Image (cartoon, rainbow, N blue to C red):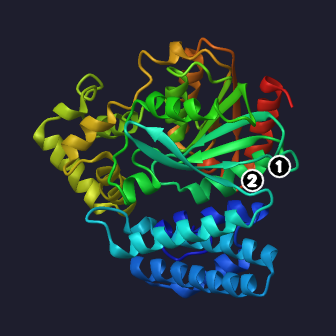
Amino acid sequence: MPLLFKNSLHDDFGTWPLAYISCGGPDFGELQAVAQAVGEGDDSAYCDAWIAAGDRLAAEAERALAKGRRLSARELFLKAACMYAASYHPIYGEPVDPRLLTAFRRQAAALGQGFTLLDPGIEALRIPFEGSYLPGYFIPAIGRAQEVRPLLILTNGYDGTITDMYFASAVAASRRGYHCILFDGPGQGEMLIERGVRLRHDWEAVVTAVVDLAVTMPLVDPTRIALSGWSLGGYLAPRAASGEHRLAACIADPGQWSVAQGYRDFVVKLGVTPEGARDLGELEPGVLDRMWQIVQNDRRLRWSTVQRGFWVNGADNLRDYLRSVQLFTMDGRAELIRCPTLLTAVENDPLAARTQDFFNALRCPKDFIRFTAAEGAGSHCEMGNRSTLNRKALDWLEGVLGS
C-alpha cells in the first residue's frame, strides 16, 4: 500500500527523501504536502508539484541570503535541490522532456549554491576522463576538513543523482571523519541528461579516473581510499574494484552479480529453458513479443525497462537493450577483487536475490550484512531506515581502514 502518494510508482519515487530527513533533507510534512498537491494527478502533476516546492524553497533561500542569513539559506537551497531531484523520475526517457532538463538544472544550481555556503566549503571537481571530464564534488570531513583523511568515493546507480547520494551517504560519512567524492559517471546525471553519454559496464575505467585524481589531492590518504555503490552501484562498485587495485575497501549495497539475471528469470517464467535464457539477445521473436507486451502493460516494468533502461543504455528496442544488460556481469571478475569487500542484502529487494552466491564467489577478505523489514530496513537500499545502513557500513569501514 502506498505510504504518501496515491499512485504506487509515484510513491516509490516520492518517498525516497524520507531517508534524507536526518541528514538535512525535506521534513515529513513537506513531503506530505507535495503528495497532497499531486493527489490523483498524473506524472505531469507529480513533476509540477515537486518543482513548485523546490521553487518555493529556492526563493526563500535567496531571500535569506539577501538578509545575510547564510545558515538558513544553505539549509533551504539543499532542501530545494532534493525537491527538484525527486521531480523528474516518472518522466524519464527519450526524447528528453524539457521539464526534466529544467528540473535537473535547477537541482544542480540549488545544490551548488547550498554547497558554497557550507563551512568548510565543498569543492566542485572536473575529473579528467577520456578527453573530457566527469563532474563531481569533494566533500571534506566535518570537523577535520584540513586533515589528511581516508576517502570514500560514492558511486550512483541507474537513476540516482548527486543530490540523492549526498543526503543518503555523504553526510553520514563526512560526520564520521571521511572525506568524500561524489561524481556523475557515464549514464548518470549531467553525463546523461546534458551530454548524452550512456552507461557502460566497465566501471573500473570510470573509477580509475576518479582515483587518479584523488591520489593527487593533498588531504587524501592514498592508502585509505574506499569505494561504495548503492542500487546499480552494487554492481558498479565491485566491478570497479576488480580492476582498480588502489582501492583499500569496497561496499556494494546490494551486491549484484548480474544485471541481466532478473530478465533471465523473467523469460524462464515464460517457458524458456535456462539454457535458452542464457543469451537474451537471441530470444525467439515470439518470446520477445510476449515479453514486450507484458512490459508495456506494467507501469513499473515499462518505466524501468523502456523509459529508463533504453535511455540510459542507449537502446531503442527490447532486443538491443537485453543485449546491452548482458555486459553488466561479474563473470570472470569477482575473483579479481583484492580489497576487503562488504556486500549487503535487503530482505524485500529482488536485486539482492543472489547476493549470497556473489559473496560465496569472492576470494578477497569479505563480509556480508543482511537488513530486514523488522528493523525498518527491508526495502531497496534501506531507504526506510538509511541511517542503519550508514551506521553498520561505516562501522565496517572503520574496522578495515581505521578511524
Q: Residue at x 61, y 62 (%)?
A: 16
Hey, which quadrant is residue 152 in on the image?
top right
Which residue is label 2 attached to?
171
Q: Pointer 1: residues within 10 angstroms few (<14), some, or many (20+)?
A: some
Residue 359: x and y in percent read 59, 22
Q: Residues under labels 1 and 2: Cα distance?
A: 6 Å
Count of numbered circles in the view:
2
* 136, 370: nearer the viewer: 136
Which residue is label 1 attached to?
175
What amino acid is labelled 1 in the image? Arg
Q: Is residue 159 visible?
A: yes
Image quarter in which the N terminus is found = bottom right
Q: Residue at x 77, y 31 (%)?
A: 397
Disc sitting over residue 99 in the figure: none
Secondary-structure class at tag 2: helix
Residue 109: x and y in percent read 55, 69
